[in-house]
Amino acid sequence: MLSFPELQAIASKYGHNVIQVIPGDEHCQANGTEEYVNHSYIAFPDIYLGIYDDEELKQASFFHELGHALIADDFAASVDYYTPTIEREIWRIGFELAKNEHGLEFSQKVHEWVEKQIQTYVEGWKREHKFVEESKCTSSSVVEYLLPKQGVPSSNLGWCSKSKGV
Ligand SMILES: [Zn+2]
């Protein structure tokens, strides 16, 4: 594991600052402590490192936030802005950086945790897009299907949307 000054040095190499959020600090007062429990954020140029019991999850999150800054600008468009695929790519970029440049490899536990995070993005995305079965779409809407590249396993999942051209 890396020390906090080491994380700061890595972040500054990419033009970022790291702010360690502490329970009850100004960030917690402004946004609620729970927003920072096992969660980190990036707001360029600051990385807000959340509150974690587990140091490995914290460091994995740090590299994920760096990945947000490093992902190619056109990646999101290339996957039709499908958040779970974008987030998965960001985890991959962050972990690659950790391994290649800092010799840090994360445990199976971290990888399983990341899969759970991605699953929550899938659920959130479905909610946001009112993901439904085709039969539930009304006549005024059409069902659109995800492309296979977007990584959704079931081929019969889609969402209702207004007809194109309306
Ligand atoms: Zn993310």
Image (spheres, grey):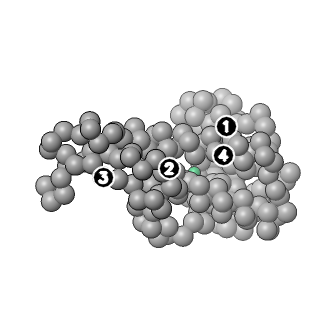
| Disc sitting over residue 144 in the figure | 3
- 52 shown above or below 46: above
Secondary element at tag 4: helix
Q: Are marks 4 and 2 in contact (CB under 8 Å)?
A: no
Secondary element at tag 2: loop
Residue in the picture at 54% in, 70% down: 72
| Disc sitting over residue 114 in the figure | 4
Residue in the picture at 48% in, 51% down: 152
Q: Residue 126's quadrant in the figure?
A: top left
The crowd level at tag 4 (other Cα within 10 Å; few <14, some 14-19, many 20+) is some
Nearer the N terminus, badge 4 or badge 1? 1
C-alpha separation, residue under disc 1 versus residue under disc 2: 27 Å
Nearer the N terminus, badge 3 or badge 1? 1
In the image, is 2 to the left or to the right of 18? Answer: right
- The picture places residue 134, in percent across and down from the top left corner, at 29, 42
Residue toward you, 89 or 51: 89
| Disc sitting over residue 163 in the figure | none
Residue beneath disc 2: 153
Residue toward you, 105 or 32: 105
C-alpha separation, residue under disc 3 versus residue under disc 4: 28 Å
Secondary element at tag 3: strand
Residue toward you, 9 or 72: 72
Nearer the N terminus, badge 4 or badge 2? 4
In the image, is 33 to the left or to the right of 53? Answer: left
Camera-near label (1 vs 2) is 2
Camera-near label (4 vs 1) is 4
The kind of residue on which mark 1 rests is: Asn
